[in-house]
Amino acid sequence: MPTHATRPPRRLDLTALYDLHHHNYLRYAELLLRTGDAHRAVDDAFDALAEIWQHVLSTSSPAACAWQTVRDHVRALADPARLRPTAHLEPPQQDALLLHTVLNLPLDVVADLTGAEAATVHVHLRTLTARSSA
């Protein structure tokens, strides 16, 4: 496994995104993984992003692409038992639940992190509330 010292340098804009959201990406990863695996998953996700960064920049939401890449890398390493409580939810609902309700992130931070609109995150949370009261 490569160490941080052997990782190739990243573009400044990708590094800025990493620096901006790293703490919350890591908090999310640590919900589902051991600490060492969480760090590895987030770093590996950004290595993967570095390889396709030009394409990511051409999308409508680079933040959404980054979130999906981090999420995919974390979920690939996650113990299925840790995912079971939210397995019945759609991915955006899982994200809203874990990031807002479990990690206590404000809606605007969840939106920035996932590349979604704050109103969309709110709708996902309302849908979960409606389900639980039905």
Image: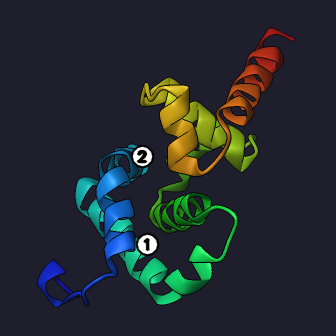
Q: Earlier in the sequence, mark 2 or mark 1?
A: 2
Q: CA distance from mark 2 to mark 1?
A: 13 Å
In the picture, residue 15 is in which quadrant?
bottom left
Q: Is 123 placed above or below 133 here?
A: below
Give the camera-side residue of 100 and 81.
100
Q: Residues within 10 Å of mark 2 (few under 14, many from 20)?
A: many
Give the camera-side residue of 99 and 61.
61
Q: Is 40 placed above or below 19 here?
A: below
Residue at (60% x, 42% y) in the render: 95
Q: Position of residue 76 (x, y in %)?
A: 52, 68
Residue type, label 2: Tyr
| Residue named by callout 1 | 45
Label 2 SS: helix
| Residue named by callout 2 | 28
Residue 77 as seen in the image, left or right of residue 4: right
Q: Quadrant of the N terminus?
A: bottom left
Q: Looking at this rendering, what residue extends furthest in the top direction?
A: 133
Q: Position of residue 44 (x, y in %)?
A: 37, 76
Q: Residues within 10 Å of mark 1 (few under 14, many from 20)?
A: many
Q: Is 15 placed above or below 91 here?
A: below
Q: Quadrant of the C terminus?
A: top right
Q: Position of residue 74 (x, y in %)?
A: 47, 61
Residue type, label 1: Ala
Q: Which mark is residue 119?
A: none
